[in-house]
Amino acid sequence: MSAKVADVMTRSVIAVRRNASFKELAVKLRDERISAFPVIDDDDRVIGVVSEADLIAKEATAGGYEDFTGPLASLLHRHELEKARALTAGELMSKPPVIVRPDDTVSYAAQLMYDHRVKRLPVVDGAGRLAGIVSRTDVLSVFSRPDKEITHDVMLSRFLTDPLPYRITVKDGVVTLAGEPESDSLGHEIVRTVRHIEGVVAVRDRLAYRSDEPTRTFRPLV
């Protein structure tokens, strides 16, 4: 079973409109103790994301460093200087936003976070309207499943219709599979299936393959 974004996302989201002022954003970031806001239009569709990193450029250039030449100037890219001059969420926001949908898998959300180096993703419905937000903490919550539940799901795997020839143990989310599958291809398919069960941290492959392949450990992203 693959966890869906809808299973872990936060449905109560603090969002801002395009015309929200810089000061309003800074105050909300401090008071709400969050690091980013989805920016929505009048129809509640997500059009961008503004983060504390977008706002910090103004403070970084407050001393007039944008006029300097030399090594320091090379660190301040034109894009960052534009952010420093911005006054509203619409001018500050990163766009287009990196988004996910409620039916997307948690592993897909994790991949987007990793690829785009972001801490959270707006969740949108079919019309692009804000439905929630998913954070890194939310994504990692799938690994909190008890070992007993994971063992139960492994035993119910469609490839383990007769689990008697196998020895299955789960410790801290790490599944160890031992036994002799009917064929090497079946053994590999069992490992791949177990690796995608929600909450599995890794799979230690101790199956007795007929080709005597070395044992392996598979570590899923999520």
Image (cartoon, rainbow, N blue to C red):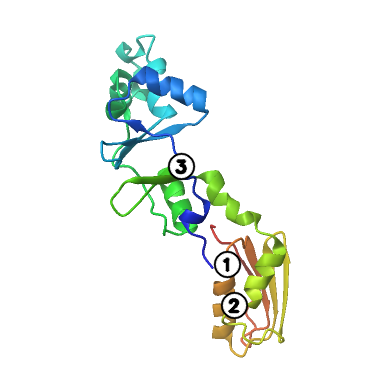
Q: Amino acid at mark 1?
A: Ile
Percent position (x, y) of residue 82? 28, 23
Q: Secondary structure at mark 2?
A: loop
Residue at mark 2 = 157
Mark 2, residues whose alpha carbon is within 10 Å: few (<14), some, or many (≥20)? some
Picture layout, residue 119 above or below residue 35: below
Q: Amino acid at mark 2?
A: Ser
In the picture, measured across the screen, residue 195 lies left or right of residue 6, that is right
Asked if marks 2 and 1 touch (Cβ < 8 Å), the reply is yes
Residue at mark 3 = 120
Picture layout, residue 99 above or below residue 187: above
Nearer to us in this view, 204 or 22: 22
Residue at mark 1 = 197
Percent position (x, y) of residue 176? 70, 71
* Viewport quadrant of the N terminus: bottom right
Residue drawn where x is 39% and y is 51% of the image:
100
- The quarter of the picture where residue 164 lies is bottom right
Percent position (x, y) of residue 86? 29, 21
Taking the image as drawn, is residue 158 in sight? yes
Percent position (x, y) of residue 80? 33, 25
